[in-house]
Amino acid sequence: MSLSNGTGTGTGNDVANNDGNVPVPVTRIFADFVANVQPAALTAQVRDRLKEFLLDFIGVTLAASQTSDSTEPICRAVRALGGQTDTDTKNSSSCTVLGKGRGWTPAYAGLLNAALGHSLDFDDTYAPGTLHAGVTAFGAGLSQAEVLSHSDIDTDIDIDRFLLAVAVGYEITCRLGRELGNEAYARGFHNTSTAGIFGAVATIAVLKRLPAATVADAFGLAGSKAAGSMQYLANGSWNKRLHPGFAVHDAFVCVALAEAGVVGAASILEDAKFGFLHAYSPKQDKDLHYLVADLAVRWEFLETSLKPFPACRMTHGFIEHAAKLGRDRDSDRSQSLGPPQVKRITLSLSPNNLLVVGAPTPNKIHPENMVDAQFSAYFTTANSFLYGSDNGVRCYEPDRLRDPAIRALADKIVCVADPSIKQFGSKIRVEYADGHGDPVEVDIPYPLGEAQHPFTRDQVDAKFFSLVNPVLGEERARRIKSVVDDIEKYTVVELLGLLY
């Protein structure tokens, strides 16, 4: 899709690209893309990746529906707000929440599926934008597809249209996230939700086949709902888990308003004074031509990776390699490696990532709750060094959080900023006490799961079964995987019928 073929309504003081003064009407171009893209744009590679991402989203969300401590309070609140009606109904106002049954209103079903999918911090990650695009794309897509399938307009919505809508939602979120960059976090914004609401709007719009003018209005309205504060780091609050849920819920609101004729702000994404990219990120090298180039040809979201560990992606290099330097190194030794045998562990990460997972605050060094632990380079490294990397969410149980050995080792960890480190790269250096070995330093350019250090399909499947078998049983889990693998043969409603 070229820059000159747009027919949308975006106008205003467009941000100039960083290589000149030519304005780039990002909002209009994105709206045209959403309105005109067709399933033929889905290559075999895109389809295969979407299936992997869908399987992963299902596994993580189902596990969270039964194990996350925030699930029941959030569900109770949604019920109190009228978000669940008759659990046996099948109509245009009844949707499925994974692991929680049917009868939820569309916007609140989207809120819950997205929030649950993010609650374990085990969901897919797009490194260039430091965000999680799948929860908003699937959260919006499953609910909207189910609504249309139960309406008089569409019957069992075409699976190609569903996959296309999800792909477009991923793409809008990832492209915006790339231009926001890590710098948005320093300003206090969580890219997953601030960019994610625009992706959710796009997913809903593709499924509803909305015209470009309506999409542009919905984007304009979403600009006033884009939110997600990083202040959750102060006390391990559940705000972060809700961020993508809020984004999906509000995307439904914005689309409904736009369809009703409510006018949204023009040029919401690119305006140089009040626009989204300018207001939400101080990043200096935004490239708005690259942002809109080759839509439906170059799928940026294919750089998304799946998580091997339920923790902030910024800690994954430490988790993987601390296990190799600690427990795995100790496997052939008669004397165990613990805090007394370690003099110091130095963790190097980018300055922006240091703010998120490496700040030397009490709730980082000795976390008391799951969220603080997931965002602690100190805890995740110490836990992996002592107990290995294959703990899953078990490592966040109270006895592990208060484990004396973990706390003693965490006290010997120092986190430092290294401006040469990019994205999710890191370095770890272990200095052993006298007689226990020479210092070891490992440079970790990419965590496990990135294309340069891939998470294999067998590992994807193993993760799925480890999450779903305890919830629905092995037989149902295998049936779900079979349906996802051949999703073109099924409908969204048939898939959802297996997920509660």
Image (spheres, grey):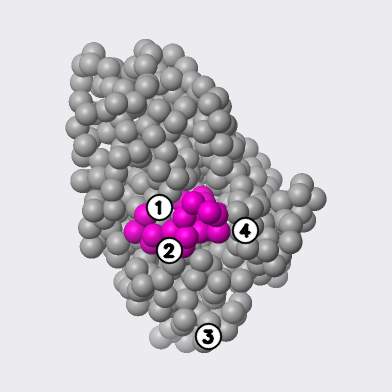
Q: Give residue 178's position: percent from left, percent from top.
A: 35, 38
Based on the picture, tell me whether residue 138 belongs to the magenta stretch: yes
Q: At label 4, which amino acid type do we have?
A: Asn
Q: Which residue is mark 3?
A: 474
Q: Which residue is mark 4?
A: 91
Kindly report which numbered mark, 2 or 1, lies closer to the viewer in this rendering: 1
Q: Secondary structure at mark 3?
A: helix
Q: Which residue is mark 2?
A: 54
Which class describes the residues within 10 Å of circle 2: few (<14), some (14-19), or many (20+)?
A: many
Which class describes the residues within 10 Å of circle 4: few (<14), some (14-19), or many (20+)?
A: some
- The residues colored magenta run 137-161
What type of secondary structure mainly makes up the magenta span? helix
Which class describes the residues within 10 Å of circle 3: few (<14), some (14-19), or many (20+)?
A: some
Q: CA distance from mark 3 to mark 4?
A: 30 Å
Q: Secondary structure at mark 4?
A: loop
Q: At label 1, which amino acid type do we have?
A: Val
Which of marks 1 and 2 precedes in the sequence?
2
Kindly report which numbered mark, 4 or 2, lies closer to the viewer in this rendering: 4
On the question of residue 224 being in view, the answer is yes
70 to the left or right of 452: right
Q: Nearer the viewer, residue 44 or 426?
A: 44
Based on the picture, tell me whether residue 258 belongs to the magenta stretch: no
Label pair 2/1, CB-CB below 8 angstroms: yes
Q: Secondary structure at mark 1?
A: helix
Kindly report which numbered mark, 1 or 3, lies closer to the viewer in this rendering: 1
Image point 24% across, 51% down: which residue? 41
Image point 61% across, 71% down: which residue? 500
Q: Give residue 160's position: percent from left, percent from top.
A: 34, 59
Q: Which quarter of the image is occupied by the N terminus?
A: top left
Q: Which residue is mark 1?
A: 166
Q: Quadrant of residue 215?
A: top left
Q: At label 2, which amino acid type do we have?
A: Leu
